[in-house]
Amino acid sequence: MIRAGLGRDLHRLAEGRPFLLGGLRIESDRGELGHSDGDVLAHAVTDALLGAAALGDIGELFPPSDPRWKDADSLVLLGQAWDLVRREGWKLVNLDCVVSCEAPRLLPHREAVRARLAGVLGVEPGQVFVKGKTGEGLGPVGKGRAVEALALCLLERGEP
Ligand code: MG
């Protein structure tokens, strides 16, 4: 059996916040606002995995109203969600992501981000890909006020 999962997230950017992508801190004059650490890519990936397994979404598992998740490390949240999915017998075939923001550029950090995500998921970096896009000057992403991430995953498991 195979299942596809889709995740999408968007965070505002603000000065003085760390810019995090898949657990990697990237040098930037602004970073994601959020109740957790705001790691937009980790959140999109978490939702893709949970969605593929029909196990809910990140807001249900880690509600922003719960003080336990204030400034939480989103890679830890991703690991916990992935544990739930794995316990149902699912294995990751591949994960493909798009991050859209005006700055910083993803490409110099792409391999490090792939390695981080692959490490948390216990797969090879070859199973994880991440692409960077800009907003072409349009909308909140293009004006540098937000960063958006999309994630698509494929899971497989044997018939019970
Ligand atoms: Mg989020």
Image: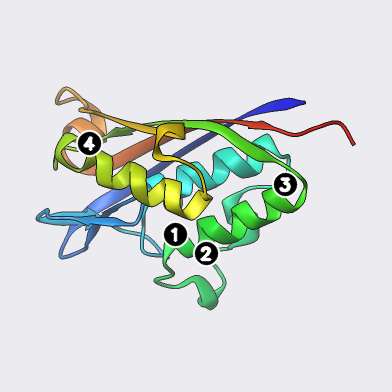
Which of the image's four quarters has the N terminus?
A: top right
| Tag 3 residue | 55
Q: Are marks 3 and 1 in contact (CB under 8 Å)?
A: no
Front disc: 4 or 3: 3
Between the C-alphas of marks 1 and 2, the distance is 16 Å
Front disc: 4 or 2: 4
Q: What amino acid is found at the position of numbered circle 4 in the picture?
A: Cys
Find residue 65 and report its image quarter: bottom right
Q: What amino acid is found at the position of numbered circle 3 in the picture?
A: Leu
Which mark sits nearer the N-terminus, 3 or 1?
3
Q: Is 6 above or below relative to 73?
A: above
Q: Is 75 above or below relative to 94?
A: below
Could you tell me residue 143's position as x and y percent?
A: 16, 35
Which mark sits nearer the N-terminus, 1 or 2?
2
Q: Nearer the viewer, residue 126 or 60?
A: 126
Res. 75 mark: 1
| Tag 4 residue | 101
Residue 80 horizontal side relative to residue 86, left or right: left
Q: What amino acid is found at the position of numbered circle 1 in the picture?
A: Leu
